[in-house]
Structures are given as structure tokens and as C-alpha cells.
Amino acid sequence: MNALTLLWLIPLLPFMGAALNGILGPKGRHGAVTAVGVGAPLLSLLLALGCLWQYATSVNPAPFQQTLYAWVAGPFQIDVSFLLDPLSCIMLFVVTFVGFLIHVYSAGYMAHEGGYQRYFVYLNLFMGSMLLLILGANYLVTFVGWEGVGLCSYLLIGFYYEQEFPPYAGQKAFIVNRIGDVGFLIGLFALMGAFGTLDYQRITAAIMANPDHLLQPYALGLSLASFVALFLFVGAIGKSAQIPLFVWLPDAMAGPTPVSALIHAATMVTAGVYMVVRSNAIYQLATGVSHFVAIIGALTAIFAATIGLAQNDIKKVLAYSTVSQLGYMFLAAGVGAYSSAIFHLGTHAFFKALLFLGSGSVIHAMSGEQDMRKMGGLAKHLPITSRTFILATVAIAGIPPLSGFFSKDEILGETFASGHYILWAVGMITAGLTACYMFRTVYMTFTGTFRGTHEQEHHVHESPASMTVPLIILAVGAALAGLVGIPGKLFGNEHLNWLHTWLSPVLARFPEHGAEHQASSATEWALMGVSVLVAVAGILVARALWGRGRGLAGDQAFASRLPFLQRLFENKWYVDELYDRIVIRPVKWLARVCWKVIDVLVIDGSIHVGAFVTEITGDLGRLTTTGNVRNYALYFFGGILVLFALVLL
Amino acid sequence: MELFVFSLFALGALVSALAVVSHRNPVYATMSLVVTLVCVAALFLMLGAPFIATLQVLIYTGAIVVLFLFVIMLLNIQREEHSAPSGGAQRWAAILMGFVLAGLLFGLFWRAHAGAEIQPLTEDQVSLTRLARLLFTEYMLPFQAIGLLLLAAVVAATVLARRPDGRITAPGEESK
Amino acid sequence: MDTFLQLLAGNTLTRLIFFPALACLPLLFIRRDGAARAYALLVGLIEAAFGIGLVWANWGSPFPLLRDGAPLPWIPSWGIQYSVGMDGISMPLVLLSVILLPIVVIGSWEGIHKNWQGFALSLLLLTTGILGALLALDLFLFYIFWEVMLIPMYLIIGIWGGQRRVYAAVKFFLFTMAGSLLMLLAILWLAWTYKEMAGAWSFAFADLLRLQLPASEQAWLFGAFAIAFAIKVPMFPLHTWLPDAHVEAPTGGSVILAGILLKLGTYGFLRFALPLFPQASQRYAPLMAGLALVGILYGALVAWVQADMKKLVAYSSIAHLGFVMLGLFAFDLMAWQGALLQMVNHGLSTGALFLIVGMIYERRHTKEFAQFGGLAKVMPWFAFFLVFSTLSSVGLPGLNGFVGEFLILAGTFTSKSIALRGVAATATFGVVLAAVYLLKMVAATIWGPIKHEENRSLKDLSWREKLLLAPLCLLMLWIGVAPEPFLAPSRPALAAVLTSYQARVTEIPVNTVALRPEAPLSEVALGVQPPGPVAAEARQ
Amino acid sequence: MSPSYAVSTADLWSIAPEIWLAGAGALLLLLDAFLPALKRAFTPLSLVATLGAGWLAWTSVPTGPSFHGTLDANAITCALTLIVLLAASLALLASDGYLRREGLLSGEYHALLLWSSAGMTLMLRANELLTVFIALELLSICLYALAGYHRRIAVAAEAAIKYFLMGAFVSAFVLLGIALLYGETGSSRIPEIARALAEGKGSLALEALGVVLLIAGFGFKMSLVPFHAWSPDTYQGAPTPFVAFLSVAPKAASVAVLIKIVAAASASAPLAPKWSTVVSLLAVLSMLGGNLLALVQRDLKRMLAYSGVAHMGYLLIPLASLNRDSWVSVLVYLFAYALMNAGAFAVATLLFDKPGEQHLISDLSGWGYRFPVKSACLAICMLSLGGIPPTLGFLGKYLVFLHAVENHQIWLAAVGVLASLVGVFYYLRVVYVLYMKDEVKAPVAKAGDFLGNLSAGLAALLTLVLGLWPGPVLGWVADAVARLG
Amino acid sequence: MIVPATWYMLLAAGLFVIGTIGALTRRNGISIFLSIELMLNAVNLLLIAYSRQLGDLTGQVIVFFVLAVAAAEAAVGLALFIAIFRHGHTIDVNRMNLMRW
């Protein structure tokens, strides 16, 4: 039996799981809910593995496209169809695998929370949408998934709806995402207009057949390729929380921690990267926009890293870290290293999911406390959690041979090789900062003395197996995932970088545009050394400031030496406030003006004035009917004279 | 001679007409109307309409004016009351517009008919027979209709003048 | 007359139109509220069955045009005919109308406290008016039905409405009346022009379509039609009656008003104003598209700052119908498909939203956001339906709203005009604003802690209420996931109208009125009519 | 030459309806005097009179001139006669209950109403100015008396005296107009006047003045602005059921004469275009003035009086471009107006049962539920008056506007549209007061008034049914106009 | 010298205008009515004058009828004055304003 023919079931199964749990209702039995909620992703995972196996083992794998039905027919046909190609294979694996683990973890983490069933409905819904996003064979299906995950993000961030903040955070996430989606949509429209289709393969084929078509001037002084690339990137900015639309992601931490791991670290936020890579043919033709992407990525990376330095909420730190890492991915995509972007996406999925789940375990142990200032010395209470967490931290810091090292280093190497030295430098500094703030987290959480209340201390315990087992599995992944992308050049064997080879069919090659950057292996080695050194330096700084049981002293030291920077970082560069002042308030003011002035005063006012004038005219007119018959006779007489005058004239 | 007679009656008619419209006491006004009517009747005579002149005197002065006097006496109206001030604007507008109309009529009549030759009276024109023949042939229908009109007027007058409880009495009695 | 009665007895459009009106006669003698209500539901269900059956029976056919035999003379002296027909353009709206009818009855089940008899009468007459206006193929007939809709709606708002119901009802009436009187003049002018040209009176749409008018005449005639329809839609700046009408109308009234009545405006543009005045509509397309854009953004902005749920939804209607108008004035098949679908979508999602607002209003007798918050805790089903309908209204992919908006915007963006590209791009921001104000509504009502003690004891939706919303939500999902079955029947009709419209646009303008040659009846109704030799003669 | 004084049979048949009406009136008077026990049957009897007269007008009146050309009957006059008699019938039906309630039931009322109808039917057929004048006086005198018929209430007397003084004053002007036309053209027969005008005989200015005076005189009867001021006072004070007649029938008869006069005056080439201007001015003033003043009325009857003014303005629109088709619009409009206006007053009779008090619209608050059928009738009449489909009133407006469009006077139609927008507002006010307000005044319980209900119901039903199925009415009217030759 | 009919016409016009002004300025209802009678009489004079000028008797016929009409009007009018006097004890038209506006 050909597993590929069941490809469509992969996204459908979680949807069905969600529907089933939805029908079970809030009163559904715990076991049943778990069975459905975790079972559906498991089935998806198994099916996905089957598909991947089938796909990978087929000779000379050609992209597999499966069309279910026509979403819209007619001259502008858009199908509901799925595509399995090397890129979606990677994504499929990451999403189903990490997703399943997080489902398992959730079963433990959420076991005692209210709304257990609702949680799994949302989470399954998310899995379905995410799979739709990555398996979609055209931009539209991807977009459906794209917004679907946005919705789930909204629902899950606002999961604790009885509090004030989470619903607000969810709303913010949704709206900010939507701003990006507008860009995405406009990009789609332009594609639709240019190619009459949204199908990936057909568009790529059309571009390859006639690249010059895309270089024609289109609108806003941009070529078609640049226009599309720019607007698609706007979508990516929103979804992947890049400058300037990153503000939603830190707030999104209001949701349950597994959600943060799954959605706001491993999968959804990387959709932007996926989409850019998916559209690489266009981006390759839009060199200017690609530079822009790289710059945004680099800026976001360092910017978020600085904020990460000054956060006290463990999840906030991880959130900014995610933003920062996503910046790396865009940096990679911007400099044309698409496979590096996907590589980092994959490794990041593992170690960041692990970090989040670890933090979830910590929070679980701390009875919901998220403030690192109240933690400390947890390592001895949480052996598995602390070890896996530290492993992931090392991975993200970029210490070989853990996964983060390979992927991050590949990005930096490609950046350097492509001649973006400034961006490379920024990336390097960020790497140092990353190592620094991540180890700050580790030190503040796991070392030193406990700073929380006694009650909390009393309750601290290691999490159940359903939570720790995923941690361990992810830790293995975080440690080893880098091996799929060993920099082959160093060893003179390009094919050693399996991922690069695997993905190469997906990447368009334009003879005149895509000159491969070649760096000598000596340079590569040197760069690698530098990045390791930087990471180690970052760790040492962290250790100096926060390590060795110094607790909060490091923060105070930082605050007293650089009060301005500290405040700036702690308050996230005041971006939220800035938006409030320059966007939200003026628009709200405008809205009030529209309502109170234009609607009420001008339009209704003029109508009321019209009515009033009419009525006043009538009121004045009625005064002519004096009741005195002599007046009436006079009107008659006057009327005659007027009429006669009219005739005489 | 004819001019003199005309002037006399015309003047009489105008003066008495002015008296009709200006005298505060309705009784005097009514009496002045009699004078006007008689003067106009005389002019009818001069215009060769003796039958109409007779009717004028008989019906108007003999019947209508008497009716007026009767009602005025019945209602015991002596003078116009002064309590409610008469609207000045109404008065002046009326007079102004009256003059406009007068000017118009005078002008138009003068322009249309000044110097029109007038034929001497013929027998036919003063013939009562011819008048009667007209009445009974060409104007048969109005003649019949006027019968109904008069009947209706009688019924209308009785309906209106009846006391609220239906008895026909003089209005003066009820106030007592 | 006999033929008419035969039509009335058969499985025809005529029966579909007049069944509700005829059903009013027995209703005159049903004075008790309960009985009248049940009767209205029965009639509504039968009517829905008629409607669905009629559409179903003709689904397989290419659906060019379903007519009730030949046109019947109605007022022969003026060539006024009783002529009705359904094609792919009116079909979705007819279907929506008949489906909404029983839903409105059930939705008003408890909300209408007095005089159910009158309410049912108004509702049924209104339905006749709506269906008639949707199906009329004679402009006089159309006008009659158009006006027939007014009175029942006026009564529904004015009798069963809220505090300022009379103001709202009168405002609704006068606005609409002002527009339609202008349209009446234009219709008269058209008919007279036709008489001058062809020698006989006719108000038949097919006949009037043959008129080829000079630009100046087209301009004012189009203006008259456009104002009438724009008020109904409503387009900025003729929209201010809508928020008042919605806020004051009872739930059922709001549902019908938003669900169907507003669509008559956009339908009027598509069916009459554009084909009749191709060059004028082309000339004023930038203006109309611009106003549509303003409507989208303006409606959204104003909706955002409302404190009343119904007012918010009302302003959202302005924004949503702005999309429809934009689609219509893109003159692109995809955009038109989207516009037509969006009319249905808006009927479903806004209808559902009004029902939901009505449900909470029945419980709390207020629609102010400030009075709610945290209802998800006590009313999970309510929360579910509210979120679902809101998402549909927001245009979330996978639900119906997205399909319409996507097709409209994509069609507008990809149409030939460069300026429209900018308009479409700007209009896309309406999607963000939709999220802003609708999520504000959701957040303010169901999320957060419960702030008012009286909200703690609220009952969740009853079976009746769930049953009411379920079909709507199912339809939203269905259209969102697989819209093609809903698009396919209308495509040939829209394509035909568009083709002939474009053929007319490209005709050489005439200086005096000319008459195009006659086209086969079925095609005429669709607007298919390539310029022929007569038009060519007129050019010389 | 031996003139035959005998009245020919044909001549007699030509006034058969009037003879029938006059005779019936006289009979009722006699019955009142000698068989007062039959009082209860007066209304049915008088209905027999109107219906019989209608039947006679329909079947027996020969077309063409009679009585030496003083009368001229044709299909249109037949239609107008029927409209007058329709109004009379509706008013009689509505009167019965009122008269009984007020203890005023007597033969005089019916007789005067029948005679007045006779005057009207005569006037609209009259083709000679003296006959017109006599008929006018006949109908007027009856109307004066009927307006003041309710002896116990002061407003009725005031209504009557105002109407009377104005009427007499206007009569003098009409007479002056007749005199001028007669003197300048040498004839009092309308066709001959037309001929003389066409030939340019006489002083054009004086003839024009004569025509203006006649237009004003009949404009007064039709209560056109600025000759309208009496009508609200008179309508308010006069017995309500009688106003159902007063507000319709004299207007129908007067417009017939007006059209004849305008048509004749248009024979004069230099004057012809002026009449269009004059009529347009009157139409615009009436439409706007009537509607604006009706808008601010609180008294239902006054409101309807001003609304009547406005309606006569609409009615004049087809006269501004007078041709044969004008008749179609005029007749349909009049027919609609007769039904809906008489219907409205009939309902007002039923609802306001305190003559002499104001007929405040606000008193109707909430009565839509207390009197569902009557209120529905009133609402239908109001909507029809507002010109909202599918009522007959809409059809009338539609035809009037169509006529304007057809004759390049779309601006007039536009003014009409504007004015009717104002109109809709106050007609709707009645509807919303009926249905959308809470009751403020408890109505006095009273015995059922079958005939009154019949009158209101019939009028409303016809307004609605004929609005839906106007084919018969329009066909008949078009046929009548076609037979005009 | 034969006085031309024109002069009678002018006189009639004068009388008519006097009557009109009277009708418009008097407050007493009966005085108004008297003025109206005056107007009618003026028209009568005009008719007779025209009749004389045209040499046509129709004018006289009209006057004949007008006289009858005037009588009828007088009867009704005076009855009305009696009726109104019963209610308000006045025939001042300025005071007859129970209904206005």
C-alpha cells in the first residue's frame, strides 16, 4: 500500500481529533480526551513517517502532489492539494515529531488544569493547520494553514481566558499577525495576477522558464519579483516575529508553556522562514529584497538578544531568544543560504522546544511561578529537567558538537561567504549575547540558592514521566540533529552535508544570478573557531555575573553600571509604548473622529438640519393659516394677481 | 343728457358703494347698498336691460337687502366691535392690491374698448320675448338647475338656522 | 390571471414568491401569540423547502435561467409585465433568503414578546418583497417589490424595536425611500426612452437592455440607480441609517436586514445598474471603488470605537459590503464571484452575529460591552458560536468569509486597472481592522474575568438557540472549506453578464439614443448581447 | 324660426343621473317629514340613489352634447361622475354611524349630499360657463350647509362660515372671469370661446385675466396653494364623514372644469405656453406647501387637508403638459385619491368620536392594537397617500410622474419626488403612532358601526387590491380616453 | 351723446374693486358679505355692458341667473351668520379663529 496516497490524512487526522474532542464536550472523560488528543498526532506522525519513508526510498524522488478537489474552479482554478517534496519532508518530520512529543508532554503538564479538553481541541487544531501550512501545494492552502495556526495561537495564548492578560495577548498576536498577512495576501494577489495560479510547482516552473518576466517593473518602483518577495516577507515578519512586528511573541508567553514550545518556538513562528525558503526562486530574483531580509533578520537577532539579557520571566527570555534565533534564520534566507535556514529551523525546533518544555517543567515544579528571581538552585530538585535544559542551552549557545553549533555556524559562514561582513559581525555578537543570556537563565534558575517562598520550595518536584520522557527524547534530538548538516566543505565532501544535498532540488538555480559563494575551507575553520570562542566568551561573562551562586547580584551589577541600557532592555526598547503612541492612539483617535464628527456631526447632522429646516419651514408656513378668513381671501386675491402677472410677463 | 344721467348714477353708485364698504354700522351699510343697487339698476335701464333692472330692484332691494336688514336686526349688531384690533397689514395690503387690480382693469378695459363704437339699441335687444326664449331653449338646463339650487338653498338655510336642539327660533331668545 | 393562478399552484418561482404573502391570509385570523409563532415557523419551513427544492431541482442544469413561462401582462397599457426568473446571480440570494426565514422565526421565538401575529405578517410580507425583488425581470415589478420590502421592515423596526425605534424606523424608511424615488424617476425615463425608440411601452429588463444611451443620460440615470442602491448597501456616506436601524431593530429584523436586505443593493448594482449603464458605470467606477474602499476602512474604524455590540456589528456590515462593492466595480469575473459569494457570506456570518447578540440581549437586556466580560465561563456554547461567527466575519481562511474576500481582492488586484491594484491593496488592510474590532467584541464579552455579578447566573444557549446557529455555522464551514459548489452555479451567469457588459463598454458611444438588436430571451435576461448591426448603424 | 321649447328625450336622458339624484334627495326630505320612522333606512336609500345614478351615468347617458351644447358627455365625464359618486357613497356609508351617534340623522343631510353630487356631476359635464357657474353654486351651497351641519359644535359653524365667505368671495371672481371671457369672446360656450381665442378675437389680456380668474376659482375648490387656506379650517371643523366627501368630490369635479378651461385657453397661440407655467407654478407650490404644512400638523384632519393640497399639486403635473394622455393620469390619480382619502376620513370618523374636539394624531397612540382592522385600514390609506407600492396611490403618482417624464418635464416630477419624501414622513407618523406608541388615551366604548366600517374597509381594500391588480382600472381608463376620439 | 359701454365697464371695475377692498378690510361678517354682493353687482353691470356692446342677450341671461344665485347665497349665508352668532355671539371674522395653523 502506498502511504503517499494517504498524505491528505496527515493534516486531516488532527482536525478530526479536534472535532472529536469538541463533540465530546467539556464533560468528556479525561482518558478519552487524552486518547483522542494525543492519538491523532500520533497517527499523523506514524503516517508521516510512512510517507517520508516511502518518499525517501523511492528512486529519484520527484515531488509528490496530491490534489483533493478544486477549491475554486473556473479560469482561476485553485486546488486543495498537498505537496511532498524535500522541503516539506523536513518540515513534516519536525512538525509531527516535535508536535507529537509536545502533545505527550501536555498530557502531563495540563493534567490538572481546567479546560483540558479545550486545550487538546486547540492543540490538535493547531497541528492540523500547521500540517496544512507545510503540506499545501499552493500558496492558498499554505495561507489557510498560515491563518489557521494564527487562530490557534490566538486561542491558546488566551487559553487562560479568565484572566485579564492572556486574552489580550492572544488578540495582540492575532492582530499583529494579520498585519503581516495583509502583506502575504497582497503578495499572493500579485502572483495570481502574474501567473494565474498559486501552485508552487507551476509558479517555480514558470519562473525558471522565463525569469526575466519577474524582473519587469511592476509597482511601487519594484520589479514583480521584488514586489512579491517584499510583500511575502511582510507576512513572514508578522508570523515569525521579526522587527517591527515581533511585539506579539513575548506577550504570547501568557499561554500554557507547552504551547509556547510548540507554537511559539518550534513550529508556527518558523512558518515565515519556511515560506521564504519555499519562495526561494522569487527571492533569488529579488536581490534587493533579499538584502533587506538579511538585514531585518540580523537586526532582529541582536535586538531580541539584548532584550533577552534583561528579562526576568523565564519564558520571556526564551521568547526573545526565539525571536533572535528566527532572526538568524532570516539572515540565512536573506543571504541565499536557504538550506541553512531550514537547518537552523530544524535544530532550533529541537533545542528551543526542549528549552520551553524544560522551563515548563520548572514552572510546573514552581507551582506556576515564572519569575527567575524567585528561583535558584533547582538543579538538585529537578535532575532530568535541569540536565536537559542545560544541554539545550549549550546547544543554543553554539558549542560543538551540539546541533545549534552546526546550524548557527553554517549561517554565519554563509553570511561571511556571501560578503555581508557587517551582518556577519552582528551575527557573531548576537551569538555571544545568546550564550550570555541563556547561561544567565541557567544560572539564575538552577544554581545558587532558592529564592522563592517556603511553600514553593516544599512543592518543588520533578515532573511526571509524560513530561520528562519528551524532554529526554528532545534532548537527544537537540544533541544530534546537527549531524544532518555537517559542513561537508570542511572535509572536502559536499555530500556529507546531507541536508544541503537533500534540499537542493527545492532550490532554484539561475545561472546568471545564483553564483555560489565559495569560501575556502581554511576560512571556514577560522570562522568556526571564532564563533566557538565568542560563545565561550558569552558563557564566561554570564558565569562571572550570575554564576557561582551570585543570584541576583549580576542583575544589580548590570543595572548599576549601565542603568540606561538595562532599563531599555528590560522595557523591550519601549517598542510597545512606541506603537501605542504612533499607531494605536492616532488610529483610535481617527476612528472617534470618524464616528463622532463625520458620522454623527456631519452626515447625521446635515440630515437633521435638513429635517429641522423642513420642519421650521412648515412651522413658519403654518403661521399663514391664521384662522382669519380675511387673510385667506387676501391670499386668494394676491394669488390671482401673481398668476396674472405671470401670464402677462 | 345721457352722459349727465350716467354720471349722476355712476357717481351715486360709487359713493354709496364706498359707504357700503366703509360705514361701521351695518344697517347704514345695507342702506347704502340699496342706493348702489338702485343706481346700478338705473344704469341697466340705460343699457337697455329693463327686465334685469326690474329684477334687480325687486330681488335685490326687495328681497335680499331686506333679508340682510332682518338678520342684522335679529342679531342686534350695531357696530363693528373695536376690541380686536384690525390687522393693519391686511388692510393696507388689501387696499394696495385693490388699486393694482383697479389699475389693471381700468387699463385693460381702456385699451381694449376705448373708442369702441356702440350700436344703437335695437328692438331685439330689449325684447323680453327673446330673453325668455333664450332662457327656455339654450339655457334650459341652467334654468332647471337653478330650481334645484333654490330648493337646496332653502333646505340649507333651514338646516343652518335651526337651533341646536332643532327648533327654529330667533337666536336672541336663547341667550335669555 | 388564470395563467398566474396556474403558476401559483405549480412548483414555480411564482409560488415561491407569493406563498408567504398568501400565507398571511389565514394568519389574519390567528390572534394568539403561540399559534401565530408556530404558524410562522411552519410557513417558513415550507417556504424554505420550496426554495431549496426549486434550486435543487435545477441544480444539475447549467443554470442559465429558470423562468416562469412567458411574461404575463400585468398592466398592459404600459407594457408592464409580470415576469420573474432566477439565474445564477439571484439563486444564492434566494437560497439565503428562504433559509434565513425559518431561522429568523426561531430566532425571534422568545425575543418577540408582543403581537406575534403582526410580526409574522410583516416577516412573511417582507419575504415576498425580497424574493420578488430578487427574481423580477421587469423593472416596474422590481420597483414594486423593492418598495414592498420597506413597510414590513419599517414596522418590524418600529414596533418590536428598542428605545429609539421610531427614529430608527423613520430614518430607515426615509433614506431608502429617497433613493428609490430617484430610481423610480430613472426607471420611468428608461421606459419612456424605450417607448420613443421602439414605439411601445416596456419595462422589461430585456427590452430596456437594448437601449444604447448617450453618455450624459447614462450618467444621471446611473447616478439615480446608484444612489438608490448605495443607500441600501449602504455605502459611505449614505450609511448612517444602518447603525440606528440595526441597533433598534429586534433580532429577527436585524438578521433579515443585514442578511438579505442590504444585499438587494449590491444585487441591484450587479443586475441592473451595471448592465444598463455600462459606460457610465465604467466612468464612475473609480468613484464607486473609492467609496467602497472608504466604506471598508471607515466602517471598520468606526466599528472599533463602538460601545454597543449591535452597533459594532452594524458598522462591520458597512465594511463588509464595502468589499462587495469593490468587487463589483472591479469588473472581473473572479471579483464578481467573490462579491456574490460575499453577499451570502455576510448574510450568514452577520446574521449569526445578530442572532447571538440577540441571545445575550434577551438574557441581560443590554448590548453594552461594559456589561459583559468573562461570559465564556458561564456560557461556553455562546462563546463557541460567538467566536465561530466572528472568525467567519473576520475572514479566517477555512471559513466562508475568507473565500469571498480573497476572491474579491484577488480579482480586483488582478484586474486590468492599475489604480484598482492600489485600492485592493489598501482594502486588504480592512482585514486587519476587521480582526481589530471583532476581536475586541469577543474579548469584551466572553474573555477576561466576570465583572458583573448578574452575569454569573446566565444560562447557556438552549437547544433552540443552538439548533438555530448550527446550520449557519455548518454553512460557514462548508463554504469555507469547499466553496466551489457555491461558486459553480453562478459562474456562467456572471461570466455572461461580464462578457456582454464589456462588449457594451467598448461600444462606440452614441450621441442619441439607439436601440440594439433583439437577443434571445434567455440570453437577454443574463445580459448577453453583443453589439450588433443596429448599434453599428446608430454610430453613423 | 319657431323654437321648440320642448325638452327632448335625449336631453332628459343626458341628465338622468342628476334627475335621479335630485329626485332621491327630495324624496328623502319628504320621507323625513312624513315618515320619520324610516330614518334608519336613509343611508341605504341614499346609497341606492348614488349607485343608481352611477348606473345611469354608466349605461344611459348618451355621449355628445345635449341641452343645446350646455352639456357634453363622454367616457371621461362618465368616469369622473363615477368617482364623484364613489366618494359620495363612501361618505354616506361613513356618515350613518356619525349622524346616529350625534342624533343628527335626518333627510336633509342625505338630500344635500345628493344634490351636491348632482351639482358636481353636472358641472363636470357642463360645457358652458353659465351652467358651470350654476352647478358650482349648487354644489357649493349644499357643501356650506353640510359643513355647518353639526349645529351643536362651534367649530362646525366656524368651518362653514369660513368656507362660505371664501366661497362667496371666490364666486364673485369666477363670475368676473366668466363675464370677461363672455364679453371678450362673445360666447359663454367653452368650445366657442376656444374658437374665438384661436382666432384672436377680443382683448388677449382680458381673456387671459378671465382664464386666470377661472383657474383661481377652481383652484380654490381644489384647494391649491395659494387658494388653499380655507381647507384645513373647514376640514377640521366640518363633520368628519362629510369631509370624506368634501375633500374628494368637489376636487374631482373642479379639476375636470379646470382641464377644460386650460385646454380651451391653450387654443390661443400666444397664451398657450403661459398656462403650462401657471399650472406648473401652482403644482409646485401646492406640492411643496401642502406637504410642508402637513408635516407640522398635530390634528389628523388638518394634516389630511394639507395632504389633500399636496395631492392636488401632484394632480396638476399632467396638466402642465396637457394632452389626451393627461386624462389617464388624472383619472387614475383621482380615483386613487378618492378611495384613499375618503377611506382615511372614514376611519377618522370611526376613531374620533367627539366632534368639536381636536383630532390629535397623538391620540391614536397604540390604537393599532385596540382597533386592529380600522387601524390597518387607516395605515393602508396613509401608505397609499404616501405613494408607497403596492397601493393605488403609488400607481397614481407613478402615472403622474410618467406623464411628466414623457413630456420633458422631469424637473416637475423631481419636485414631486422631493415633496413626496416630505409627505412620506407625516403619513408614516400616523402609522407609527398607531403601532409603535403606547396608548395614551382610552377610546370611548361605542356601538359597532357596520356601515362606517364597511366604508373604511372597502376603501382600504380597494386601495390595496387595485394597487396590486391595477389592470382593470387602467384598462378601463385607457379605454375611456381612447374613446375620446 | 351715447355713453360708450366702455365707461360702464370702467364703472363696473371700480365697483368691483371697491367691493373687493371692502370684503378684505371689513371685520364684520355681514359687512363682508355686503361687499361681496357689491362685487356681484359690479359683475352684473359688466355683463350687461358687454351684452349691450356685443348686442347679445346672453349677458342678460347670465345676470338673471346671478340674481337668483345671489338670493340663494344670501339665504344660506345669513342662516350661517345666525348659526355662528349662536355659538360665539359675534360675527366678527377676526374672532372666528377656533381653528388655525
Image (cartoon, rainbow, N blue to C red):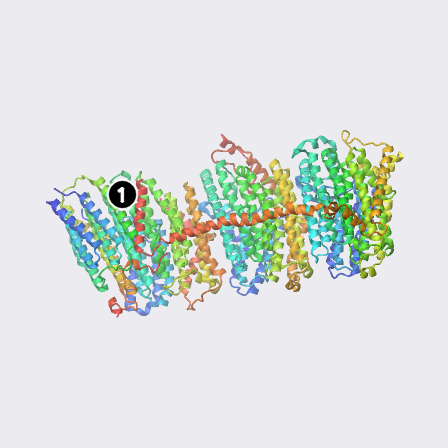
**Visible residue check, residue A9:** no
Please tell me which residue lies in front, A210 or D99.
A210
Placement of the C terminus of chain A among the 4 image quadrants: top left
**Amino acid on which disc 1 is placed:** Glu
Q: Relative to residue C116, is residue B100 drawn left or right?
A: left
- Secondary structure, mark 1, is helix
Rendered position, A476 above or below E29:
above
Please tell me which residue lies in front, A76 or C47.
A76
Q: Position of residue C405 (x, y in %)?
A: 64, 45
**Visible residue check, residue D2:** yes
Q: Position of residue C468 (x, y in %)?
A: 64, 58
Residue A395 occupies which quadrant of the picture? top right
State the residue lying farthest toward the left: B1
Is the residue marked by circle 1 packed among few (<14), some (14-19), or many (20+) residues within 10 Å? many
Rendered position, A316 above or below C410:
below
Q: Chain of mark 1?
A: D
Residue picked out by circle 1: D207
Q: Position of residue D281 (x, y in %)?
A: 36, 45
Q: Relative to residue A580, is residue D383 drawn left or right?
A: left
State the residue lying farthest toward the front: A560
Q: Position of residue D256 (x, y in %)?
A: 34, 49
